[in-house]
Amino acid sequence: VEGSSQDDPFATPKDLGGRRLALAKWISHPQNSLTARSIVNRIWQYHFDKPIAGNPNNFGVKGALPTHPELIDWIAADFVENGWSIKRLHRLILTSRTYQQSGRHPKQYELAQEDPKNDLFAFFPNRRLTAEELRDSMLHITGELNTAAGGLPIRPEMNMEVALQPRMIQFSIAPTYLPNKSRNQRNRRSIYVYRIRGLADPFLETFNQPNPNDSCEGRDSASVSPQAFTLMNSDLLTDRSIALALRLATESKTLAEQIQRAFQLVFNRNASQSEVAKIEPYIREMRDYHAKHTPKPREYPTEITRSLVEEFSGQAFEYEEILPVFNDYERDEQASGVSPRIRALADLCLILFNSHEFVYSY
């Protein structure tokens, strides 16, 4: 670009005063359709779990050809003509007939023979929520989500076994991972979660959050056993279930009303009569169970013993690492601190959070 003839429309002007500005103008030039097509392809992939052009990281000759070249060109042109508005692009896709199709096709068997990969988008492909969407959705449903924009990265809670494990940095042990002291700060959106290369968040990693060291062409959406165990047994899901149960108890009085409110918040629909009839005896049974079984409170250590080997002598030694955050830590509401009635209601919330209707976009 810099050494091109001045007759070249992409040549750097002599009076520009900066190569980065020249590069930015070159990337966003109206005649450079590659940028707009790449953006459109990525956003389409997000909504449909598959791109129009099969290799989002490679629009060159070695990349997969788009299944609908005219479509991607039209959307890209519309995107540029309307000021590169990402919000408008999302609205365009979400209001399209293709996006609003059913996830079931009336001739599913015949379609599987003719178009096994659904390249023609004859039906809406079910998409599992991303790791960040799952966390943010649960916080939003419980009423805990802090939607403040900007600011410093946040450190949410993670499994204590992972947070306290030793990590090496420059031949020494790195400081222990410590969550933010304030609950409101910890419950900000996942886009603000601090990424540590050598310490991935177990929940986000289990649900295929990409490694920050590599460019991610497409997230793996495979379902594996650790995901089911995480949704059922992790501290994150337990705490969110307790928080939702407390919200239900505050907003609704009767058990039937609480069940309806739970379905409205998690599924955005009302529970059917048969669902309510099955859930009510289950919750009453769990009340009796929790009245006889009280869970132990979760412990937060204020110091931890570390072991090292002296570099020159080879002698082992230990030292105490102080964890000051947990001295006046604002804990999430836990099962040990609520009544059996709330714990029984939280069992229902946990089941709803584990359902396909919540985890997948249909």
Image (cartoon, rainbow, N blue to C red):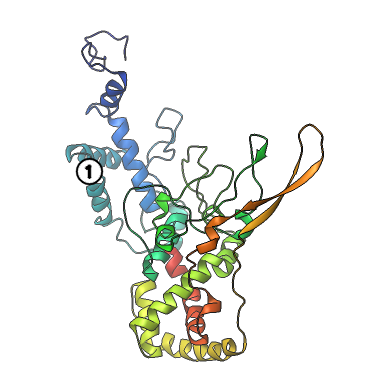
Q: What residue type is labelled 1?
A: Ser
Q: Answer left or right for 214 relative to 316.
A: left
Residue 333, horizontal then vertical, whole percent = 48, 73
Residue 314 in which image quadrant: top right
Q: Answer left or right for 308 relative to 118.
A: right
Considering depth in this image, is 103 or 343 the residue closer to the camera?
343
Q: Which residue is drawn at 23% across and 9% down?
A: 6
Other-residue count near label 1 (Cα within 10 Å), few / some / many at <14 / 14–19 / ≥20 = few
Residue 248 in which image quadrant: bottom left
Quadrant of the frame with the N terminus = top left
Rendered position, 1 above or below 194: above
Residue 299, horizontal then vertical, whole percent = 61, 67
Residue 140, horizontal then vertical, whole percent = 37, 65
Q: Residue at x 77, y 37 (%)?
A: 310
* Res 187 visible: yes
Rendered position, 113 above or below 250: above
* Res 104 visible: no
Rendered position, 153 above or below 288: above
Quadrant of the frame with the C terminus = bottom left
Q: What secondary structure is marked by label 1?
A: loop
Residue 327, horizontal then vertical, whole percent = 54, 62
Q: Answer left or right for 88 relative to 264.
A: left
Residue 33 in which image quadrant: top left
Rendered position, 101 above or below 266: above
Q: How many labels does the image show?
A: 1
Q: Residue at x 50, y 63 (%)?
A: 328
Which residue is under mark 1? 85
